[in-house]
Amino acid sequence: DRVDRALGSTITLSMSQLKSELENIYGICTKGYLEKRELAMALAQARVDATSSATGTDLEEATNPDDSINVSFGMERSFFDYAGDKLDDYDDVEVNDDTEIPNLSKPTKTPSRNKSPNSNRIDLLESDSDVCSPMFTPQPVKMALQQKTPSNTEKAPDYQLTKKCPGFLSSSSSKLLTPCAFSPPLNSPMATFAAKRKVPTPSIPALSNDLINEIGGKLYPDLRHNFILALTCHARKFRHNSYQRASFDAALRSVVVISMHLSPIRSPEAARRLKGVASHFYEILKESVAGSKGKKPYHPKKDKFSCVASAALVALLDMEESSEPMNSTNGNSFPMEDLIQNINRLIDTRSNASLNQTAEQYMDPDNLDPGWGQVKKLCATNANTDLDGPFIKERKKKGACPSGVVFELLEAGREMAKKLRDLAKKGPAEPGPLRQLPNNTVDEEFGNVTMSMDHREGGGSSKGLHTMCDQLDIRGVPYVVRELKIADYVFFVGDKLAPVLIERKSAEDVAGSLHDGRWERQQRNMRKAQYVLGDGHARRCQICYIIEGDPNKRKVHGGNVGRRTWFQSVDDCESAISELPLLGF
């Protein structure tokens, strides 16, 4: 009753007045209220609560002590249950600033239940003695309800609020309003962030020899160890000149980064893109694999390493597990002499990376040995920030060993050492695609489908290929990059080829293809492949072209498209594109 009487004086206020009083006087946030009726109800309730606190009157005792709802929305307030028949009366009317409201504070006048058809006046129904006044504002809030336990002779009222409050579910045997599970619509921006079920990444398609002869599918070896040997060799040259001291440090850092990379590196471009590898070493990386066509790349023997960095981590891990370490305040430490000995035990002799000097010689500040310099890089914090380093801690401990220097394996180094040791036990990596998705899981929507992309897409490795692959990695698309003889994109469902071949070209590529004859040659190959790969006319593959860009926007001086020497006008390009549907594309 108090809320109904307070509502008559609050509903005549404007929206700005209601918000101002709620926020400034009662400290109630109004961001969750979208309608004026909701603001008026909240203000009426706030006034009644404030009056009850000041006079010491318990409002819940005056109405119903068991039907209060505790709402947490940046504040705590008490609300009455919103009865279904009263909710109908409030939702079927529209309230604005010009609406006339009866003076409900006069107890002698009882408002009529029905709304007068000839006026804008709203008649509000006073609550019965057994049912509380309606007072509920649906908001996305958490609620804890103390339910009233009905007696044996009293039946709990049945409220059906789901229709009026679509964001909530109500039970026929309970007055508790339960929030529905949030499910954004498909066209909503929030649908992007909905949790998706993950499944294992599809395996690399195993192609038969016949299929490789038809569409291609060259595999690439792992070149990590070739890059490590080339950078270590150049580091030995850089240390003899003062102006190359920065290049010496950059070479050692690049060796450490490549040695800690657990996935195969199959091209100089892929190595250059690693964070921490100096870009000006690209020519050195290319020279290390130049002329190696038909030759097997270098791989260390099983359980051996090609550089000191990875061997040092595994050596410390083996020493922790097999021997008694020296007591240290922060962990287990080992003498420098023992560390050098165990590193040489794990180094592959063909790599020429063994530590052949004594501990005293390596402690000389003027000794710029590339091997021991890698150990120092593992200890430096600023040199390993990209790899979650440092991995090793160097300590001075006089009397512990002849050198007085001990080394301790940190937690980050311990985790990395375990991965490197497991990788060395597997032996050399098998040849594989030039690049592939590094994730172990993908969204369920991709199923068992893998996209195979030609290694010349985007201009090849030296231009935009790796940028395109980075975007596929971000989106979690299962893909592999291989040398394709036909089309730019093919798809595999497991190990079976999907019946679709896609060629992608920009408007400038169309002009270039028309100039050098590739336009007709590629179309002949795709029309032939649609029957050979599709097993006859009835099951032939679909052949598609993706044309990007507008030839009018790629004109150069003289009106030609792409290059002036191609002698291809806009009409020539548009005519060639328009003929594709007639040719079966």
Image (cartoon, rainbow, N blue to C red):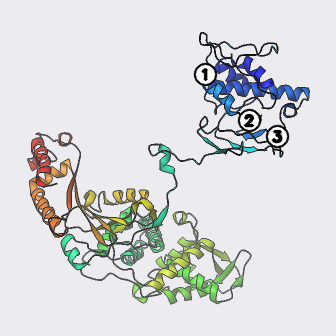
Q: Considering only vertical position in the picture, is 404 above or below 130?
A: below
Image position of 299 (left or right of 41): left
Circle number at residue 81: 2
Q: Is residue 155 left or right of residue 428?
A: right
Q: Residues within 10 Å of mark 3 (few under 14, many from 20)?
A: some
Q: Name the residue under label 3.
A: 66
Indicate the position of residue 579 as horizontal and vertical percent values: 11, 48
**332 or 61: nearer the eye?**
61
Evaluate if marks 1 and 2 touch, with contact meaning CB atoms under 8 Å apart: no
- From mark 1 to mark 2, how far is it between C-alphas? 20 Å
* Mark 2 neighbour density, 10 Å: few (under 14) some (14–19) many (20 or more): some
Residue contact between numbered discs 3 and 2, judged by CB atoms under 8 Å:
no
Return the residue nearer the eye: 503 or 510: 503
The residues tagged by marks 3 and 2 sit, at their Cα atoms, a distance apart of: 10 Å
Q: In the picture, residue 61 is in which quadrant? A: top right
Question: Could you say which quadrant of the image residue 430 lies in?
Answer: bottom left
Give the image location of residue 198, x and y in percent. Answer: 48, 63
Q: In this view, does 360 lie above or below 122?
A: below
Amino acid at pointer 1: Val
Residue to which mark 1 is pinned:
93
Where is 292 relative to 557, above or below?
below
Q: How crowded is mark 1: few (under 14 residues within 10 Å), some or many (20 or more)?
A: few
Element type at marker 3? loop
Where is residue 572 drawn, in percent x and y? 9, 45
Element type at marker 1? loop
* Image quarter (top left, top right, bottom left or bottom right) of the C terminus: bottom left
Q: Residue 485 carries which label?
A: none
In percent of width and height, residue 510 lies at: 16, 51
